[in-house]
Image: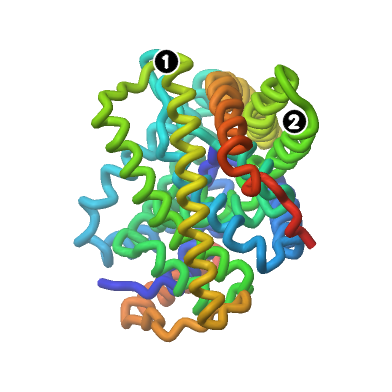
């Protein structure tokens, strides 16, 4: 899901970087001190999530978990994802400094959709809730894949086919993330309902 | 040669900005990368295979640009830009851990909210990592073999959920312990990562690179 250094054009890097930075600053403003532990925890889960590989046929995919981060944190997902991306860039060279803003935008903006869908899911019951929990996981990954392909396509017509290929590569992740999120939210709702409450925002 | 985290982060960020916006890569652009790799030649075996693995994705992107975008020059530009930046970051940070990065950002005087969040995230990564290892081992003991089926996805979802519950409990205990010691949203570290003589060398190299790239010496 990370955009590597050196791929995007300068206008795309600057505009998405500025948008990502502005939204992260707003996310930091929204984050109260009481929210710090939870934000840091979700940030570390987002970081660790990239090492949890899930088999899909002969190959495997890793979870993105931006839906889960968004559902739990709302706008604080921006600082949480930013910190995880900084550590991934420094420790494993996934992404980088110049693509940090773009990567934040690609992964954290769709997390807000996860927040909305999850709140909606908590108000419903039965099959409708299961479907909304599925969408909480899958829709943010789908939107992230769309954003990722869009920024690639905007970087020049030479990257159109790369954008298409990268979007297609994410289809299994979209489905798996939805299935895992569906069971995960149901589990958390039963075992630790307090964890899913978000009343700490400014 | 050892670098301080602050100098490493600053130099890597500046060099990334210089290279990422270049429309043409010349041998002169690789002076800083070559210099840093030469200074870090002792840990080259440690990051060489990581760079090779990372190149798989960029090779895929370059191949699609070359084959479908019909632009070999742009494919080469992406490949060179990526590898120059990755070689520098891998070489600069190969001996550093997550705590070093916290001290690096703290020394660079980044906002407290960011450095404190980074500090907590680093602590929780350790907690979550240990918990995940324990739970994965308990699954292994019970002969769990991941497959492409609902049972596997359900098990992994419950594992993630349990990981969150246990980590949250331990994270809350850590936060309470810190609050008891007077934590109010700001940290005052006593230990700092010192600056090394190599930092001066790497800073001089960066200035030289800057002059080469923008001063028209090349």
Instruction: Report the residue at 75% width, 55% height from top.
Output: A199
Subunit under mark 2:
A
Question: Can you give x and y, in whole percent of width and height, for residue B216 in the image?
Answer: 54, 64
Subunit under mark 1:
B
**The quarter of the displayed image where residue B196 is located:** bottom left
- Count of labels in the image: 2
Q: Is residue A164 left or right of residue B11?
A: right
Q: Is residue A113 left or right of residue B71?
A: right
User: Quick one: quadrant of the C terminus of chain A?
Assistant: bottom right
Dot 2 falls on a residue whose secondary structure is helix
- Label 1 vs label 2: CA separation? 27 Å
How would you rate the neighbour count of disc 1 (Cα within 10 Å): few for under 14, some for 14-19, many for 20 or more? some
Residue, disc 1: B148
Asked whether the viewer can see residue B212, the reply is no
Q: Residue furthest front?
A: A190
Q: Is residue A80 above or below residue A52?
A: below
Q: Which circle, 1 or 2, is nearer the viewer?
A: 2
Marks 1/2 in contact by CB < 8 Å: the verdict is: no
Dot 1 falls on a residue whose secondary structure is loop
Q: Nearer the viewer, residue B215 or B18?
A: B18
Question: Can you give x and y, in whole percent of width and height, for residue A195 in the image?
Answer: 62, 48
Q: Is residue B98 left or right of residue A125?
A: left
Instruction: Report the residue at 44% width, 67% height from top.
Output: B101
Question: Can you give x and y, in whole percent of width and height, for residue A27 in the image?
Answer: 72, 57
User: Quick one: quadrant of the N terminus of chain A?
Assistant: top right
Asked whether the viewer can see residue A110, the reply is yes
What's the image's color scheme?
Answer: rainbow
Residue, disc 2: A121
């Amino acid at each position: 899901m990370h955009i590597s250094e050196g791929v995007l054009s300068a206008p795309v890097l600057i505009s998405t970087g500025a948008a990502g930075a502005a939204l992260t600053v707003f996310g930091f403003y929204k984050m109260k001190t009481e929210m710090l532990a939870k934000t840091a925890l979700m940030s570390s889960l987002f970081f660790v999530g990239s090492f949890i590989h899930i088999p899909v046929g002969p190959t495997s995919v890793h979870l993105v978990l931006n839906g889960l981060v968004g559902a739990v944190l709302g706008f604080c997902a921006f600082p949480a994802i930013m910190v995880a991306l900084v550590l991934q860039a420094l420790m494993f060279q996934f992404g980088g400094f110049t693509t940090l803003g773009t990567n934040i935008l690609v992964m954290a903006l769709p997390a807000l959709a996860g927040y909305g869908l999850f709140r909606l899911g908590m108000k419903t019951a039965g099959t409708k809730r299961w479907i909304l929990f599925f969408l909480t996981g899958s829709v943010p990954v789908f939107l992230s894949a769309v954003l990722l392909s869009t920024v690639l396509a905007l970087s020049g017509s030479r990257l159109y086919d790369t954008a298409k290929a990268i979007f297609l590569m994410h289809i299994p992740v979209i489905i798996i993330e939805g299935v895992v999120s569906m069971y995960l939210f149901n589990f958390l709702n039963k075992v630790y309902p307090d964890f899913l409450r978000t009343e700490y925002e400014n | 040669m050892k670098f301080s985290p602050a100098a490493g982060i600053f130099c890597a960020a500046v060099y990334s900005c210089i290279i990422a916006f270049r429309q043409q890569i010349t041998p002169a652009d690789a002076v800083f990368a070559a210099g840093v790799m030469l200074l870090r030649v002792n840990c080259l075996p440690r990051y060489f295979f990581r760079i090779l693995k990372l190149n798989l994705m960029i090779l895929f992107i370059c191949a699609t640009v070359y084959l479908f975008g019909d632009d070999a020059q742009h494919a080469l530009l992406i490949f060179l830009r990526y590898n120059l930046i990755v070689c520098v970051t891998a070489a600069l940070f190969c001996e550093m851990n997550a705590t070093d990065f916290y001290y690096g950002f703290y020394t660079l005087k980044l906002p407290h909210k960011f450095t404190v969040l980074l500090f907590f995230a680093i602590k929780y990564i350790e907690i979550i990592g240990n918990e995940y290892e324990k739970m994965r081992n308990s699954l292994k003991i019970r002969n769990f073999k991941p497959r492409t089926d609902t049972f596997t996805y359900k098990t992994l979802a419950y594992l993630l959920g349990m990981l969150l519950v246990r980590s949250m409990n331990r994270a809350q205990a850590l936060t309470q312990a810190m609050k008891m010691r007077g934590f109010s949203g700001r940290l005052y570290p006593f230990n700092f990562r010192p600056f090394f003589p190599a930092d001066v060398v790497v800073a001089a190299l960066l200035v030289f690179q800057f002059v080469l790239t923008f001063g028209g010496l090349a």
